[in-house]
Amino acid sequence: MRIIAVWHFSQHCHHKNPQTTRVYVQRIAVKRDKHSRRIASRYRKAER
């Protein structure tokens, strides 16, 4: 993560220490999406 991005995000979250933001971002990291493509294809089929 770039330093400036951490700084902006930490300001948005009202973190005084950018290291707090780094730990926070690591804990909420999003895992790879495995299901939305199949769900979207079912939804498109239902619309037809």
Image: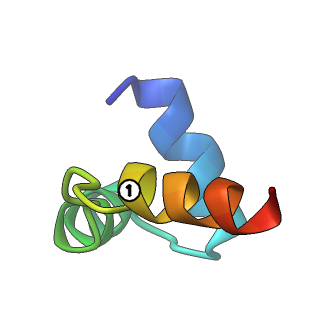
The tally of labels here is 1
The residue lying at 62 percent from left, 73 percent from top is: 13
The answer to whether 28 appears left or right of 38 in the picture is: left
Q: Please provide percent x and percent y for residue 41.
A: 52, 52
Q: Which residue is mark 1?
A: 38
The residue lying at 71 percent from left, 64 percent from top is: 12
Viewer-closest of 46 and 14: 46
Q: Please provide percent x and percent y for residue 33.
A: 29, 55
The residue lying at 58 percent from left, 53 percent from top is: 9
Give the position of the N terminus as an image quadrant.
top left
Q: Quadrant of residue 2?
A: top left
How are the residues colored? Answer: rainbow
Viewer-closest of 7 and 35: 35
The answer to whether 6 appears left or right of 46 in the picture is: left
Measured along the vertical axis of the image, is residue 42 above or below residue 5? below
Q: Quadrant of residue 34?
A: bottom left
Give the position of the C terminus as an image quadrant.
bottom right
Q: Please provide percent x and percent y for residue 6.
A: 46, 42
Q: Please provide percent x and percent y for residue 26.
A: 19, 61
Measured along the vertical axis of the image, is residue 37 above or below residue 35? above
Q: Of the residues shown, which amino acid type is indicated by label 1?
A: Arg
Viewer-closest of 1 and 38: 38
The answer to whether 28 appears left or right of 16 in the picture is: left
